[in-house]
Amino acid sequence: MNKNDCGQEKTPFLDALVKYVKSNPTALDVPGHKLGSFHTDLSRKISNVFMEYDANAPYGMDNLYNPQGVIKEAEALAAKACHADHCLFSVNGTTGGILTMFVACLDVKDKVILPRNVHKSVINSLIISGAVPIFVDPEIDHTLGVANGTNADKVIEAMDENPTAKAVFVINPTYFGVVSDLKRIVREAHRRNMIVMTDEAHGSNFYFSSKLPLSAMDCGADITATSIHKNSGSLTQTSFILTKGERVNFSEVRRAFAMFSSTSPNAILMASLDAARKEMALKGEKIIDKDLSLASYARKEINKIPGVHVYGREYIKEQNNSGVYNIDETKLVIQVTGLGMYGYEVYKELRRIANVQVELGEVSVILALIGPGTTKKHLDNLINGLKELSKQHYKAKGSRKIPSYNYSYSKAVVPPREGYDAPNKIVNLKDSIGEISGETVMAYPPGIPIVIPGEIISSDAIKMIEFFHKEGGEVLKDTTIGKIKIIDRSRWHLAKEFNLE
């Protein structure tokens, strides 16, 4: 154990929860099942343990929004493990963390520089905070049909063009494991007295291995939200909100945090954060070494299969630093177009023929994630499933050609908040081209919006929406299939202000 691990063997909140339940208290507080005394099909079909440990902030268990005891101690241990000054336990995921940081750090009309391929939670944060986005287009891999990181030169150029911007927001990493040159972006932002906020939903493992890209806190970012549940072993819906330095007022972060979280946070979720932090802080380097070894094995075997290809570190050089500064090799981005199949089809077929559930299927790729619980058997099942699909679908000549898919982001003419609040009407998709969107439309996963409130709806956006519907992809939006919500400019009092009459 090195000096940074001091105290990391403790799990103060988890221990307090176990002690409380084992004391067999008379439960005359909420929740109504009274620590598992009331049975439902959940307890009968799965386990009653979930109910038994589902306590709601009893005496001695501390309060998430004013921690003075075991939660305060557990959060301090997490902050230390992640090289941060402060940590908050989020039971509303990184979505809640991003909402928190935007409201805590930005006021109405404040400008924030950010990539356009942000998650829907960021768009919602812009709407709620009233901040004005300065979008920087990410670099696109048109062969794979995915958005990569943002070239640092473009971000710095946006800083120079918008010297009054209050903050810069960076994805670290993208859904597909690509990182931008965050350290350089932080250095340049801080030179201009700008706050750096990051989305690390898919990068919690960065904090626990020297062989992965640098974490936001190690790059000097001011505030981040990181999904411990995604690749560091806690339960779904749990994340850390981390801050470092003096540019962000932590009391304001805590104040905003309380606005976006339940007043009845789930104790089991918080205990899972405490337990996962201990495991990763003490054993993370070894665990991630295992993950990287499995990833190397999977790449080698998958690349023997006709019709599929998974990229490794050579991808960095191939992209020539075009928004690909580094990659997380525990994410397997597998190109499947050589099979003559869309990624959506491979996603479904792997589950049908091999009972393998991968993270997502896109147009040209599928994404498989390796984490602390991944075994060689898991990857062998994936490899065997891909082999079977190759036997069924791969043809050296004459296989169905899958077109490369080009992303093109719509032009924003109205800030998201104004676009969301404007009077709207619902029209057919084909009649919306050239109109201003009044809603967010996204493919899920990964939850990156195709169009957001305030953007001009382009023909490319409509083609993308129609494509996802046709190929069985899940499209999330307010309206039904074939419809979209647009701003009704004839009824909008701000139309003249934005020259949109």
Image (cartoon, grey):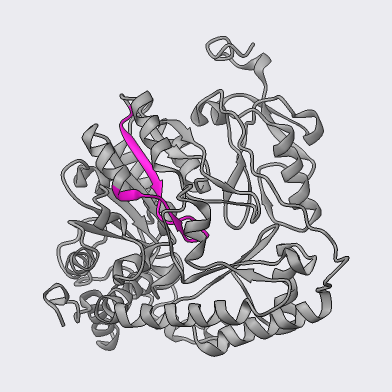
Left or right of 204? Residue 323 is: right
| Residue at 43% across, 39% down | 114
In the rendered view, tell whether residue 23 sits above or below residue 196. below
Residue ranking furthest to the right: 398
Say which quarter of the image contains residue 479.
Answer: top right
Q: Where does residue 183 sit, x and y in percent of width and height?
A: 29, 49
- Residue 414 lies in quadrant: top right
Residue 57 pos. (x, y %): 28, 68
Span colored in magenta = 165-183
Going 24% across and 42% down the picture, which residue do you hit? 252
Which of these two is toward me, 418 or 31? 418
Q: Residue at x 40, y 30 (%)?
A: 158
Q: Is residue 408 above or below residue 23?
A: above
Evaluate whether residue 247 shows in this view: yes
Horizontally, residue 457 falls left or right of residue 412, namely: right
- Residue sitting nearer the eye, 168 or 336: 336
Asked if residue 57 lies left or right of residue 456, the reply is left
As displayed, is residue 52 above or below residue 274? below
The quarter of the image holding the N terminus is: bottom left
Q: Position of residue 419 (x, y in %)?
A: 56, 28
Q: Give left or right: position of 466 versus 219.
A: right
Depth check, front residue: 191 or 257: 191
Whether residue 117 is in magenta: the answer is no
Residue 178, magenta (yes or no): yes
x, y percent for residue 79: 21, 63
Residue shown at the point (69%, 69%) measured from the top left: 347
Residue 265 in view of the camera: no
| Quadrant in the picture for the C terminus | top right
Count of numbered tags: 0
